[in-house]
Amino acid sequence: MLVLLALIGIVALQVAGMQERMAASYRAVNLAFQFTEERARATECGLEVLNGVPDATGCTSVARADIKTQCDDEFDAGEWTRTLPSGEPRTLASGPATNIRQIEACLIGEAEIGMGMTQEQGGGLQPVYQITTYQTDSRGGDNPTSSAAIDTVFKL
């Protein structure tokens, strides 16, 4: 009887250990996603500052030189997430990263985002950006275990 109880106890410990590892993995994935989302939102705020939105303050700094404007560069967000600009595979140690593309001139035809509408002041197309961010669960710190990427379109 004692051997049976000991075996049940060992199995219970193994199950508890497995559940703890699964919970830690879920937490790491969730943190990576939240930090990636935070990075994308901070970049959007920086773009608002760059474009003179009056209420945008305390944002991540974005320089015009950081924004790519070429339409035919064959950018693939999935490939960018997997590969560094040097062609090497992106690893957990290579985060964080952000790619910003200004794409309003690349969009063709009528679209729900109001393509072709003029800005209230100054005319021209409204700025539209594709923001792709990559981040880890440690925010680029030591020992990351998970990463996430977000590709979003942001219209001012």
Image (tube, rainbow, N blue to C red):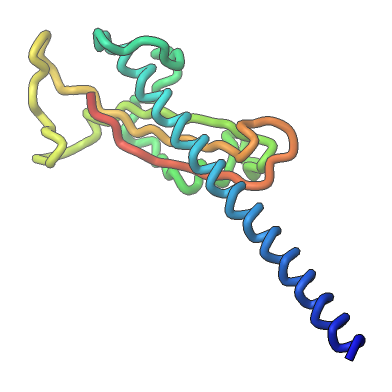
Q: In this orientation, which residue lies closer to the viewer: 139 or 86?
A: 139
Q: From the viewer's perspective, is residue 54 above or below residue 79?
A: above
Quadrant housing residue 8: bottom right
Horizontal arrangement in the rendering, residue 36 relative to residue 9 (left or right): left
Residue 16 in the image: state x and y as whole percent.
72, 66
Question: Residue at coordinates 88% horizontally, 80% vertically from top-left?
Answer: 6
Residue that extends furthest to the right in the rendered view of this protein: 3
Residue 3 in the image: state x and y as whole percent.
91, 87
Q: From the viewer's perspective, is residue 5 above or below residue 146?
A: below
Q: Quadrant of the N terminus?
A: bottom right
Q: Quadrant of the C terminus?
A: top left
Q: In this orientation, which residue lies closer to the viewer: 80 or 46?
A: 46
Question: Residue at coordinates 65% horizontally, 60% vertically from top-left?
Answer: 22
Residue 153 in the image: state x and y as whole percent.
30, 36
Quadrant housing residue 55: top left
Q: In this orientation, which residue lies closer to the viewer: 57 or 15?
A: 15
Question: Residue at coordinates 42% horizontally, 23% vertically from top-left?
Answer: 42
Residue 114 visible from this viewpoint:
yes
Question: Residue at coordinates 46% horizontally, 31% vertically from top-left?
Answer: 38
Residue 37 in the image: state x and y as whole percent.
44, 36
Count of numbered tags: 0
Q: From the viewer's perspective, is residue 17 above or below residue 80?
A: below
Quadrant housing residue 62: top left
Residue 65 visible from this viewpoint:
no
Horizontal arrangement in the rendering, residue 110 relative to residue 84 (left or right): left
Residue that extends furthest to the bottom in the rendered view of this protein: 1
